[in-house]
Image: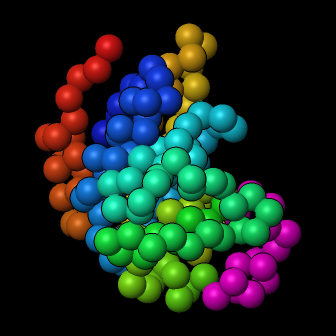
Amino acid sequence: MQYEILSASAEHTRAIGVQLGRLLRAGDVVAFSGDLGAGKTCCIQGIASGLGIADGLTVTSPTYTLIHEYQGNVPMYHFDVYRLVNDDDLYDLGYEEYFYGTGVTLIEWADRIQSFLPDDHLALAFHVQDDGVRTIQFQATGTRWEDVAQAFAHEQTPRS
């Protein structure tokens, strides 16, 4: 299932993340890709709030450390794989414990590690249009993600 949302502001992108975060559960993997500055981290901040992480705004991209862990209703593991030098870096992190573990795993620049992603995951692609509006494309794979995407689409209200 594919679904697309337009976001005209950081607040809307964050609100989209909050809605999505409320639908996520332990073991879920969400793969983020897209333009630099398109709102990936902003959306992840919203997801953190939706997962009950005390202050989602303190969530930052782990560009140099590759992973940040946060405690909420379920653990949240936030990867940024932009600076991975090679596959060994991912193995050294013990990625499988996160991807197939008991928390929610969010991966920025996931297109760089496509072959490592679980078969069942939600892919979010962010793009900035010429007018500054962000396009967020949801690509659901597997029954779990189709259910999440449908629930999300049902909850989503139009914004101007």
* Quadrant of the drawing holding the C terminus: top left
Residue at the far top in the pictured view = 131
Q: Quadrant of residue 102?
A: bottom left
- In percent of width and height, residue 64 lies at 80, 63
Above/below status of 43 relative to 66? above
Judge left or right: residue 152 versus residue 40. left
The colouring scheme, among rainbow, by chain, secondary structure or one colour, is rainbow
Which is more toward the observer, 70 or 12?
A: 70
Residue for point 82% across, 73% down: 86
> Number of labelled discs?
0
The reply to whether residue 26 is in sight is yes
Q: Quadrant of residue 127?
A: top right
Judge left or right: residue 56 versus residue 34. left
Residue 93 among magenta residues: yes
Above/below status of 59 relative to 118? above
Residue for point 65% across, 70% down: 67
Residue 58 among magenta residues: no
Give the residues in magenta: 81-94
Residue for point 50% across, 63% down: 106
- In percent of width and height, residue 143 lies at 22, 66
- In percent of width and height, residue 99 lies at 49, 79
- In percent of width and height, residue 20 lies at 31, 51
Residue for point 74% across, 87% down: 92
